[in-house]
Amino acid sequence: MTEWATKAQVIERLSRWADKLESGELKQVRGYLQLIIDPDVSMDDTGMCCLGVMCEDYRTTHHWGEWKLRAGKHLSFSVSGLNDNDDFAEDDLPEDVEIDGDDISAKWYSYNPPMRVLMHYGITSDFQGWLAGRNDSHHDNFDTIAGYLRQCIADPEKFAEIGALYFSDYEASIPENFDPEQMRTSLRVIHTFDKAFDVTPYYNDYNDYDDEDYNDED
């Protein structure tokens, strides 16, 4: 079973990921982990979202994992078996995902990193979703996203306490009923992360919500 990284490992790995985002050597895309820019011109000309850069760092550092071409130009990242998770079952897939033989629809795995990779970097499912939103919907560039990682490196306990990071030797309090491997789909989570990272909110109207308007049960 895959284990969560220690705090020291998380700091080291987030630093390496941030360095790659800041290198200026990578093309940024939105909506997919990795995307072939123009398949008619070159299959080697690709861009990545910020989470795709994390997956590529994992692959090149540990020599484990591979990119799989799906739907012509979208690539998903695989590290073990069909879905890349230790306890996968086809029933766990969202309803809109189609399975064709041993292949998974690009609707799902083209834009989700494997859970074991998130655990390697100490990234919770909540934080993965927030970072994807900043990359895809808010159009933050790689330097800006690297800045969020630098904030986590500077004060990992602060971001663990709000459920953005998780490490195996973390002893402080965590959010109530919090599971780092499950994504909570609520405005409160987004609001909490936006405030912690001091960013312009993607949901401009969520400050008008009272606590009872949030739904942490989703």
Image: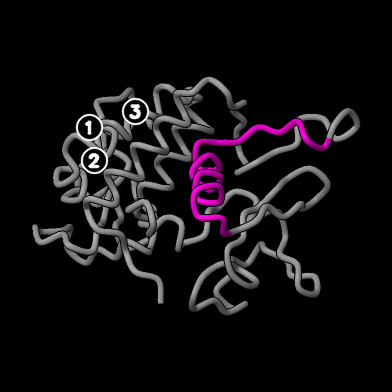
Residue 87 drawn above or below residue 34: below
Q: Does the magenta portion include 65?
A: no
In the picture, which quadrant includes the N terminus? bottom left
Identify which amino acid the numbered label 3 is placed on: Pro
Few, some or many residues within 10 Å of mark 3 (<14, 14–19, 20+): some
Instruction: From the viewer's side, name the closer residue of 121 and 9.
Output: 9
Q: CA distance from mark 1 to mark 3?
A: 8 Å
Asked whether the residues under the numbered discs 1 and 2 touch, taking CB atoms below 8 Å apart as contact, a structural biologist would say: yes
Left or right relative to 58: residue 185: left
Give the residue pinned by disc 1. 195
Give the residue pinned by disc 2. 192
Under tag 2, what secondary structure? Answer: helix
Identify which residue is drawn at 32% across, 63% down.
4
Identify which amino acid the numbered label 2 is placed on: Thr
The percent position of residue 59, horizontal first and vertical second, equals 55, 51
Instruction: From the viewer's side, name the closer residue of 202 and 48.
Output: 48
Identify which residue is drawn at 57% across, 79% down.
89
Under tag 3, what secondary structure? Answer: loop
Asked whether the residues under the numbered discs 2 and 3 touch, taking CB atoms below 8 Å apart as contact, a structural biologist would say: no
Left or right relative to 84: residue 152: left
The percent position of residue 28, horizontal first and vertical second, equals 59, 28
Q: Which residues are magenta?
A: 43-64
